[in-house]
Image (cartoon, rainbow, N blue to C red):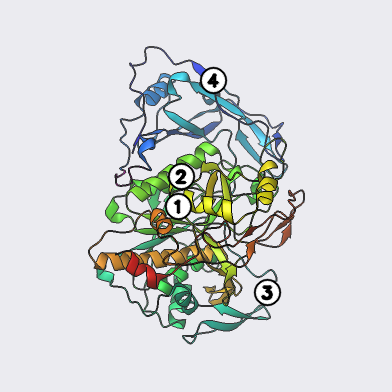
Amino acid sequence: MFPYSSLLLALATPLVHGAIHESLAALPFGWTQSTHSISASDRLTLQIAVKYRNLDKLEPLLEAVSTPGSPQYGHQIKSWLESHGIKIQSNDGTLMTFTTTVDKANTILNTTFAYFTNGATTKLGTTEYSIPNALTDSIDFVTPTTFFASTKFQRVLPHTVNTNKRIEKRQTFSNSCLETVEYEGGRYGLFTPECYKQQFNIGDYKVDVAAGSTVAFSSFLNESASFSDLALFEKAFSIPSQNVTKTVIQNGVSYNVNDQNPLTEQDGEANLDVQNIIGLADGLPVSEYITGGLPDEFTPDLLYPNASVQTNEPYLQYYQYLLSQKNADLPHVISNSYGDHENTVPENYAKRVCNMIGMMGLRGRTILESSGDEGVGAVCRANADDQQPQFTPQFPGTCPYVTAVGGSQFMSPVEAWNASSGGFSFYFPTAFYQKSAVNTYLTEHISPETKEYYSSNGYVDFGGRGFPDVTAHSLYPYVLTYINGTASPNGGTSSAAPAVAAVIALLNDVRFRAGKPALGFINPLLYGLNGAGLTDITKGAALGCNGTDLQNGIVIDGAGIIPFASWNATAGWDPATGLGIPNFGDLKELIL
């Protein structure tokens, strides 16, 4: 894939503005224009996302190899900026970064930047902007401008946590499945690595490190895995000690920074990721990609009403960095446990990031995303003027090029976790590899009355990409994770995604030892197995849109209420559990 750039004649005169490139129908919920004055000399940094070309070949040419863009692409955009006296600070051919004054930004984008406030914070932005007509085929979007969005990790803690209470310290555990610990005055039976091994049918499989399988996970929101907690986890379960390679990414550049100070580090999510991976695939090299900083684009909604609680992460910079690396330096499997409400992510931005993920697949990498912990939805409002009730799919889980991992609960029998997010995308159509499976669900496992009720009211688009793809244990019982030196209850689809990532890393180990390449984009294989190699879940349901955030039990004032909103677990693929739980014992025979 290469960025698209029109190869027109050199610019003789500055390009004139064309139609509006992007705009907001209205200011997002809670925001008004501030009376705070703005100076024309104030400086801001903008980025231009240069369009990729040949995206029509992304799906049909999965054997193609994606390479980082050449700085020669986007020449016309560069000339346009230079005609206004603007110097580009960085340009890899797909993303151009420059700093200028507000006055000049207003001129080149034919807009008026202003300060906007929601009562708690003030930000510089605009409600619409234009670019020259000759550049509309070259530019995806300019950021930050009109866009606003939000992100959180998909992790669930007990609702009664009292951080002032001291907790039982455990040094070792037996090799049994469930282990009981004292935590915050309560007793918890916790799901251990042995439980996951049983659920995935891993048995006593041992990796051959020399075969070369590698696995990684991302950390956003200032999270960083604790080495000391990992050492305690390894000791508790008699796992050989190993460390993690950490890379910190800031504005698309890596730095050697790593917070291991127990007084300042944030590690609950990162610890869950790394311990779940090493608990199942110990010995394989593990990497952590820590993406620093929060982007300027944030769309408030009922769950995230102001920027003081906004947690959106720069997916663009994260995947920009990964795509810039040589294949030899990229882990074969990467797990991600963070997500946004799809309707708060600008559609152009979401599709751009999704295409970048697709390019990772073309390079033989498997990208997993947790599906989310809000069931059918929490806010359940369309992010538009009318704010009509609507199911809330989660991005990036809705991207067709990720393997979205949902959640199950209980052990015998296993059921769909009631807070596991799933459904259908409003941005992406049904993926090519899942059309048959989704059609079977829609024709055989959901009643015509329910389909009519959901679709006629605009709650869902059944023509969208269905997610999740697979499922693993998420909660009930909670998952054992060492945090701050203590065996603690943890869980959510943030637990399921890295666990499945470990299984795929084991499957790559099987293939490498047989002289075969990595699995890469695995979804077509999983759906093509027609149920083989997966444990189907047919009990339970994903709930939501009842005014409460199922992830934390908080009642959301003004949330959309949709009576009877749910996705039932059924035979075959469904929006609650996807295709089911990967069965390593069966898959290791099927993938050779």
Q: Please tell me whether residue 63 belongs to the stretch shown in magenta.
A: yes
State the residue at coordinates (34%, 73%): 283
Q: Secondary structure at mark 1?
A: loop
Tags 1 and 4 touching, CB below 8 Å = no
State the residue at coordinates (47%, 46%): 431
Residue 442 coordinates in the image, percent (x, y): 58, 51
Predominant SS along the magenta part: loop
**Eye-nearest disc, 1 or 3:** 1
Tags 1 and 2 touching, CB below 8 Å = yes
- Badge 4 is on which residue? 19
Picture layout, residue 283 above or below residue 452: below
**Eye-nearest disc, 3 or 4:** 4
Which mark is first along the chain, 3 or 1? 3
Taking the image as drawn, is residue 524 in sight? yes
Label 1 sits on what residue type?
Val
State the residue at coordinates (45%, 82%): 237
Which mark is first along the chain, 4 or 2? 4
- Badge 3 is on which residue? 164
Which mark is first along the chain, 2 or 1? 2
C-alpha gap between disc 1 and disc 3: 40 Å
C-alpha gap between disc 1 and disc 2: 8 Å
Q: Quadrant of the N terminus?
A: top left
Q: Which of these two is toward me, 328 or 501?
A: 501
- Badge 1 is on which residue? 402
Residue 553 coordinates in the image, percent (x, y): 71, 62
Label 3 sits on what residue type?
Asn
* Magenta stretch bounds: 60-66
Q: Please tell me whether residue 194 belongs to the stretch shown in magenta.
A: no
Q: Residues within 10 Å of mark 4 (few under 14, many from 20)?
A: few
